[in-house]
Image (cartoon, rainbow, N blue to C red):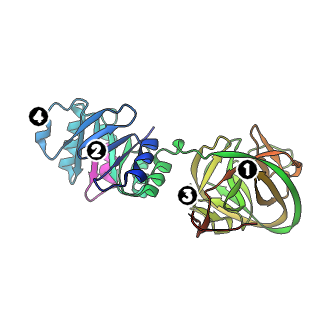
Amino acid sequence: MKELWVELDKNYRKDDLLPLVKQYGDAILQGGILRLIKSDEALNVLSGKDDGILQQDLKNKVVKISIIDKETENLTVKIADKGARYLVISCANWRIIPLENLIARTKGKSKLIAEVETSEEAKIAIETLELGTDGVLLKTSYSDEILKTVSIVKPEALKLELKTAKITCIKPISTGARVCVDTCDMMQTGEGMLVGSQSAGLFLIEAEVNENPYVASRPFRVNAGSLSMYTLATLQTTRYLSELKAGDEVIIVNREGKTRKANVGRIKIEIRPLVLLEAQVEGKTIKTILQNAETIRVVTSTSSKPVTELQPNDEVIVYLAAKGGRHFGINVSEETVIEK
């Protein structure tokens, strides 16, 4: 499992950042002291500026070094050979090749942690040379950036709190534009995408993972619904299905609420008969519009059920999003919005 460290400066907002770091992170770096969250172990961070570092006992130590040329790359390998526990590296100019070299040359000797300032840089670090670094040290003062980085470095740590809703209405409606989201990944039973007419309430629609006598399964696909439906683009933002295109990221969710990211391979929009579903959850009515066909299934607590077989009082898995309205997909908790 990849590690996420966060460097906090003296001006960080404690109430905003610290709970997030403690919930999702592995270590906090502040003032040259690294504190491992699970064990509460405190470690001094040594500076590997030159060969003088090699005169010290580096067994199980944390060493921070900037890679500016081949000489500093070789020095980093020597530090690993001396038993350093962690190597925290930053790349001053070239970012990919030095990382590739160090991943290959230090593997099995020291854990390699790359300094990054954004989630995009974190993604590059943990995917370089396929193996990636052992983790990242994120330098940020923004809680949103921490959450974005968590979703990349430790996606298994992010869970949504899903609810059980009771179906109150199944209403076939006329034909309309339906969106199939074909991803670049394989989904399993109970996995799919959250889709809904209101950003405040989304239904878990299962991927086409089930075999049937008429159509081959397509586990890369979610037949997601009408093009005006919302889905999660990140854990903080929504998008309309009509906005998605090849290369975009979507959130895959299973019935336990575990999330992961997948890229869109293509979007297929066709005119199909539709069905409106309404459900009650915690005193709220939420809705979604899906294609009316046997292969479209909503996820339940134990299995899934085709929309064509749904009955009033059937229970399905849904997600209730944060309160408030949305401005271009971003939640604005103070805004009043009524969705019907």
The answer to whether residue 64 of the structure is visible from this angle is yes
* Amino acid at the residue labelled 4: Gln
Give me the residue at 70% from left, 55% from top.
202
Label 1 vs 4, first from the N-terminus:
4
> Disc 3 marks which amino acid?
Gln
Residue 74 figure quarter? top left
Element assignment for label 4 = helix
Q: Which mark is residue 60?
A: none
Q: Are marks 3 and 1 in contact (CB under 8 Å)?
A: no
Question: Residue under circle 3?
Answer: 236
Q: Position of residue 217 (x, y in %)?
A: 76, 47
Count of labels in the image: 4
99 falls in the magenta region = yes
- Looking at the picture, which amino acid does disc 2 mark? Val
45 or 327: nearer the viewer:
327
Q: Is residue 135 left or right of residue 255?
A: left
Circle 4 residue: 55
